Amino acid sequence: MLEELLVKVVLLVLSVGLPYLFSKVGKYIGSNTKNIENGILRSLAYTAVQFVRQRLDGYSDNAKLDEAINFVMKEANKKGLKVDRDEIEKIIEASLRDFKDALGKFPKESK
């Protein structure tokens, strides 16, 4: 009698607790995955900004932006990340601001 009651209580706790636990674990994994994806995109954008600033000196700002966006989209697709052009443009613009801020902190070298 006591064993049957104990089994019913354990089954009740498991039937309520396990779905809750799985939902929490799923949300945790999903948020961490998004953070990792954002980190990869920021890294790609920073690399694109550096490349464009060094290699496309005589090009217009729009041409530089297009080249950087194309690079990030191509590399993100290789890694299986699904992103749209607007999202990448915002990340590149943020990387460019960070890059310019970092350059402003260092004195210009005299030749």
Image (cartoon, rainbow, N blue to C red):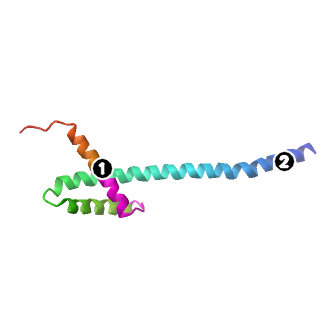
Amino acid type for the residue under numbered disc 1:
Ser
Q: Quadrant of residue 107?
A: top left
- The residue stretch that appears in magenta: 78-95
**Secondary structure under the numbered disc 1 in the rendered image:** helix
- Amino acid type, label 2: Val
Who's the residue at 89% across and 44% down the image? 3
Please say whether residue 10 is one of the residues in the magenta stretch. no
- Give the number of marks: 2
| Left or right relative to 26: residue 16 | right
- In this view of the protein, which residue sits in the foreground, 17 or 107? 107
Specify few, some or many for label 2: CA neighbours under 10 Å numbering under 14, 14-19, or 20 or more: few
Reading the image, the residue beneath label 2 is 7
Q: Report x, y in % for residue 46.
A: 29, 50
Task: Please give the residue where the numbered disc 1 appears in the rendered image.
Answer: 95
Q: How far across and how far down the image is residue 1, in percent?
A: 94, 45
Dot placed on the residue nearer the N-terminal end, 2 or 1: 2
Magenta span dominant secondary structure: helix
Q: State the residue at coordinates (19%, 53%).
A: 53
